[in-house]
Amino acid sequence: MKLVVLVLLFSIFAYINAGYCDTCGSSSYVDISSWCSKYSGWSQECCKCIAEHESSGNIHACNKNTDASIDVGLWQINSRNWDACNGGKAPCTASENLACAKDVFGWGSHTWKYWSTCSTCGCCHKA
């Protein structure tokens, strides 16, 4: 009986923490408009919408995906891109995240197509 209770408690803990991610530390919010305006090569409206839907302005936002990859930062940069845009480490600062977002945006032919929220924002094929 004790084993069943222990297994049940462990299962509940694992379920609750399945999406937990602390790669960049605790929440830290920035002004989305200010950070979007640091790059003039994209639509400011699309940038703000994407960042709002991806992280709500939390530069330390983190999400574990079902494929074991991790998204971090204001623009939720996926860990598969960290080697190419940030020397292999998580882009946890606003500046690092912006640099990676600009790279991913460029790799998408200067569109937002690589962000899962692009259709919500109506920005998949827009600069």
Image (cartoon, rainbow, N blue to C red):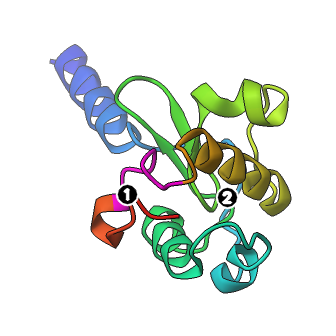
Distance (Cα) linking label 2 and label 1:
24 Å
Main SS of the magenta segment? loop
Vertical placement of residue 31 versus 72, above or below: below
Instruction: Kindly identify which numbered label has been placed on residue 52.
Output: none
Q: Disc 1 on helix, strand or loop?
A: loop
- Mark count: 2
First in sequence: mark 2 vs mark 1: 2
Say which residue appears at 59% left-offset and 26% top-offset: 80
49 over 54 or under it: above or below: below
Residue ID at (37%, 50%): 116
Q: Is residue 69 above or below residue 50?
A: above
In the image, taking residue 54 as reference, residue 95 lies left or right, namely right
Q: What element carries label 2?
A: loop
> What label does residue 124 carry, if any?
1
Name the kind of residue labelled 1 in the image.
Answer: Cys
Which quadrant holds the N terminus? top left
Q: Say which mark, if any, is on residue 60.
A: 2
How far from the left and from the top, in percent, is residue 49?
A: 46, 75
Count residues near mark 2 (Cα–Cα under 10 Å), then give few for <14, some for 14-19, many for 20+: many
Residue 114 located within the stretch drawn in magenta = yes
Residue sitting nearer the eye, 38 or 18? 38
Q: Nearer the viewer, mark 2 or mark 1?
A: 1
**Image coordinates for residue 10, horizontal then vertical, percent:** 33, 28
